[in-house]
Amino acid sequence: MQEPVCLISNGEDGGLSVQQEALEMLQQIQQPVVVVAIVGLYRTGKSYLMNRLAGKHSGFALGNTIESKTKGIWMWCVPHPSKKDQTLVLLDTEGLGDVKKGDPKHDTKIFALAILLSSTLVYNSRGTIDNRAIEELQYVTELTEYIKIKSTEEEVDDTEFVRFFPNFIWTVRDFTLEQKIDGQDVTDDEYLDYALQLRNGSSKTVMTYNLPRQCIRNYFPTRKCFTFPFPTHPDNMSNLESMNPNELSPTFLEVAEEFYLFVIKESQGKLLKDGYKVNGKVLGHLVQLYVDTISNGGMPCLENAVVVISQIENKAAVEDGVGVYRGGMEQLKQSFPVELPLITSEHQRLHTEALQEFMKRRFKDDQGEYLESLEKSIDRHFEQYLHHNEEASKKKCQDLLTSLSADMTDRLQNGFYAKPGGYELFCQDMEIIVGEYNKQTLTLVKAKEVLEQFSKNKHTESEAIRQTDAKLSEKEKQICEEREKALLLEQKMKVEEEEKLRLEAKMKADQESFEENMKQIAESKESETRRGQEEFERALESKMREQREMLDNGHAMQAEMLKLEIEESRRKHEEAQALQARQHELMLENLRKERQTQDQKHDQAMTQMNLQHEQTLTEMRNQHEQVMAQIQAEKENQETMQAIRENNLAVETQKLMQELEETKRSSVEHQAVQARAVEEKLAKLNLEKQEMQQQHERAMGTLRQQCEQMKSVTVKMPKQKETCNVQ
């Protein structure tokens, strides 16, 4: 941002409203934010300090008159000068104590918002830190009327606020006193601690005196003080913004530099409960939530804020995770179709990245509700991408078959196969098409299913060609028909095997996703526990430091009360840890149960698939045995017929030989005529024998071919007794 913008405006009726343009700027910041807010009476030079933190001479308006210059809360977001992974958000509030304000509680609302939104609060005043200055900080005593920790009516010690409130810096402007206490020089911090010391006693006067001091001690985890001398002559104060640094007091510039370095170095990032880091987007949600609550007459509740922010952030975290997953899968989709191992491995990689992205924003998802939502969404998208890949693969396979079978289609249209021997030519063309198709679709999903459908479509044409093929006997036609049925069953079995591989891949991907979830949850839980423990220890250290100061200053009763509060805090912290541990274990148990349910569904699907596969296998086995039995029966029939024909030829030959012997006893002339007749008959018989032998060989060759084809059909079937042995 080049200049400050109004974040929360003041209406004419005194009402507060969030400026949407500023809110949108804030919500674009994805980095964790360090939020420094400044409050104080008007005309005390707050804006000058904020400009200095921004590294600028001007920006926030400087009030040089008796009129308050800043109205509402103004924001300036700048890169953090030393923490490159964070953004510095500066909030300049309107001056407190402006007589023109109609709402007597308006200043307290501004003060409360500054505390709720900041990680470091700067309170700016003039003169000294005397009783009047502390009384002017009356707003701190009214904070419990505008801010509460828990949503229930459960009483909360004031010291609990220290876990949620920002660090506190008191800047004293135009300080002219000598910094001595009892004649001893003291530092700025010692001066502040002295001013915040409590008085002994229980009178109304003492209680009134101690109340604001006790609130400051209870509410703020750390306290720091800077005393600034006059920056220049009072006559030049109206020109402070335009004055060069060399025109200002060197001592003032020295303190301003110390203030700048301390704030930049020591101010921590804004945190929510359990150490959750706030970025610009979350801060924007907090601004809207707190302003709406106050404007509607409600009291901002830190516990409710955490619940609301967790809902907003967890929902956004799911969207971010799904966005990462879909973005990667959409890129892969450009390459569809791809083989199954590639899409499942890419799914697993993107699932891990999506889960990591989700975990960055996941906050207080104690029941695992949003994690479950992420998993279901990713699983749904995975199924969709599997389907898209399968559809792309099916189209590619269909186009390939259309191309490979183009010649066959032309031949069918031209009646090429409508002739004796046409069925054998058709089968040969089919074998060529299927062989080439299988070569080119080894890694494509749904390739077997497409081929099965193609084979079913061609079965009708094959049957018509077979029935009209005059070259085939009725027995051969029957065998061919049974062989085609066996081939279709083989295709069906391969489709089932392909679907089984898909299910196994899905089961493996689901198991790997579950293991990655458990790993990420464990890491996230460890991180959350560590942040929560660090937050508790910071708050505990603040209480223990306060207790030691009470003892050192003779406030035994207050020290004893703090001791009891510390013990109670430890007890509540241990109970909270135990509750979180139970909730975490319950979430893990629910995840395990969900995983078991998925495993059961997978097992049921696999069992059903195996049963279907076994049924298909049984059909194939029965079909195989039936065809092989027919082939064996035909073989035996051929051998029997061949034996009969050979026997008949032998009888005929023997008769002719006898006739030939008888001709030898005839006259010479008659003998020659008879011999020629017998020889012609013998020659004819030999020719018939050769033709018969060739026919037998052809028939046996066809049977051998059919036998080998049936053997190839059942390559993946369990080994069984061979019923065909055609030699």
Image (cartoon, grey):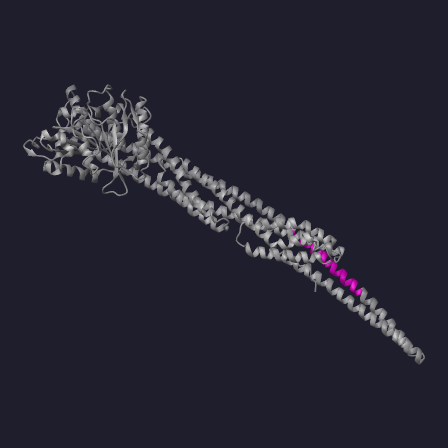
Prevailing secondary structure class for the magenta stretch in the rendered image? helix
Depth order, front residue of 66/440: 66
Task: Reply yes or no: does residue 160 show up in magenta.
Answer: no
Depth order, front residue of 300/111: 111
Left or right, residue 141 beside residue 421: left
Residue 615: image location, x then y, percent: 63, 48
The quadrant in which residue 17 appears is top left
Residue 726: image location, x then y, percent: 70, 62
Task: Reply yes or no: does residue 640 show up in magenta.
Answer: yes
Say above or below: 431 vs 376: below
Quarter of the N terminus within the rendering: top left
Depth order, front residue of 57/264: 57
Say above or below: 410 vs 376: below
The quadrant in which residue 579 appears is top left
Q: Which residues are magenta?
A: 620-643
Residue that protrudes farthest toward the left in the picture = 183
The quadrant in which residue 256 appears is top left
